Image (tube, rainbow, N blue to C red):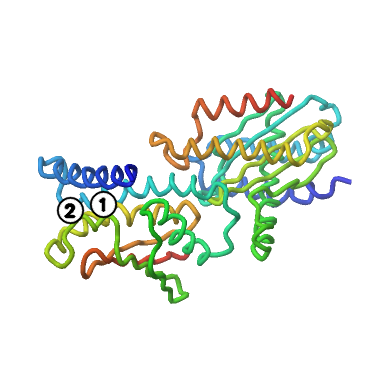
Amino acid sequence: MADEALFLLLHNEMVSGVYKSAEQGEMENGRCITKLENMGFRVGQGLIERFTKDTARFKDELDIMKFICKDFWTTVFKKQIDNLRTNHQGIYVLQDNKFRLLTQMSAGKQYLEHASKYLAFTCGLIRGGLSNLGIKSIVTAEVSSMPACKFQVMIQKL
Amino acid sequence: MRLGPLKAVPTAVWKINQWALEDENVFPWLAGTWQVLHLKCSGLVFLTGAHRVESHHFICCHPLLQNYPLYIRSIPTENELKFHYMVHTSLDVVDEKISAMGKALVDQRELYLGLLYPTEDYKVYGYVTNSKVKFVMVVDSSNTALRDNEIRSMFRKLHNSYTDVMCNPFYNPGDRIQSRAFDGMVTSMMIQVC
């Protein structure tokens, strides 16, 4: 479908745009990830506001995580998270075996070092969504072989 | 006869005082006004009988960031402080309702909280979004045209409009809402009801 492709293309351009502006000396290279993550954060906040507009109130934290894995992921990435695990102490691992933003790259380990730039935005997306639902968190991503990846969400207790 | 709201007075005043102390930068006018509010509540706010004008009052606030108001609006504008005060007291009732709701069944976990408390002249309604933004509405209780369903649909409208504000990239979450579209929507809703 066209709208899926648009999101992928826009995201790719966004990443390369941010990195290009870094090369031209507008900011240091290390800040690119942070910048992408912050962009994701704001987008996540807006998206979750819209997506939860007509849903019932959430029961607890796990309920919210399930919403992120199912509804949120389906709307943004057209598929659900494949596996959600938790230690019931504030750590959640979301595993996606075929993550959309990585499917355009060749599978395997060849471009592994570049994967992080394509995950930063999504990390921010999750963090922003959770923060708007009242949960402070730290989100990190991990790739061992493309296009599978894991997002680890660490909830920060207030 | 007006035990409900009066009982809530001390904690609310204390809370306002707390914020004012902690956050004078965020909310400077509260520091000055809370004492006035306190004086008023003993004799004026809940016992006034002279107010038969249709009145409305809206507020949205973000509790994660200390419950400060994102948007307040009232018609008529005289006696505005009284409404501010009513709205702030009702925040405690909102919290109570939400914590009681945690155990309820799915279909009962609605965003609309219903009537928070009635006073002689006004009715206070509440609504809390999933993102924990509280909407409080005060309406004249003599207005019988406003039933639960109307109030609910007004809140839906308010929520839809708030969502649009949130999705505006030029709006920083947590700032006061200054959107003209939101303003216009609230005005039209108030005029329609009055």
Label 1, secondary structure: give it.
helix
- What amino acid type is highlighted by mark number 2? Gly
List the single residue furthest toward the right.
B1
Q: Mark 1 lies on which chain?
A: A
List the single residue furthest toward the bottom.
A87
Q: Please tell me in which quadrant of the rendered image residue A147 appears.
A: bottom left
User: Observer-nearest residue: B176 or A60?
Assistant: A60
Tags 1 and 2 in contact by the CB under 8 Å rule? yes
Q: Residue at x 51, y 41 (%)?
A: B24
Q: In the rendering, at what x and y percent does residue B96 appear?
A: 69, 57
Q: Can residue A158 be seen in this view?
A: no
Q: Which disc is residue A30 wearing?
A: 2
Seen in the picture, residue A67 relative to A40 is either above or below; the reply is below
Seen in the picture, residue A136 relative to B58 is either above or below; the reply is below
Residue that numbered label 1 is attached to: A34
Q: Please tell me in which quadrant of the rendered image residue B72 appears.
A: top right
Q: In the rendering, at what x and y percent does residue A102 appear?
A: 24, 58
Q: Can residue B180 be seen in this view?
A: yes
Left or right of A86 on screen, residue B145: right
- What amino acid type is highlighted by mark number 1? Thr
Q: Which disc is residue B12 wearing?
A: none
Q: In the rendering, at what x and y percent does residue B193 appear?
A: 73, 27
Quarter of the picture containing the C terminus of chain B is: top right
User: Callout 2: 10 Å neighbours few (<14), some, many (20+)?
Assistant: few
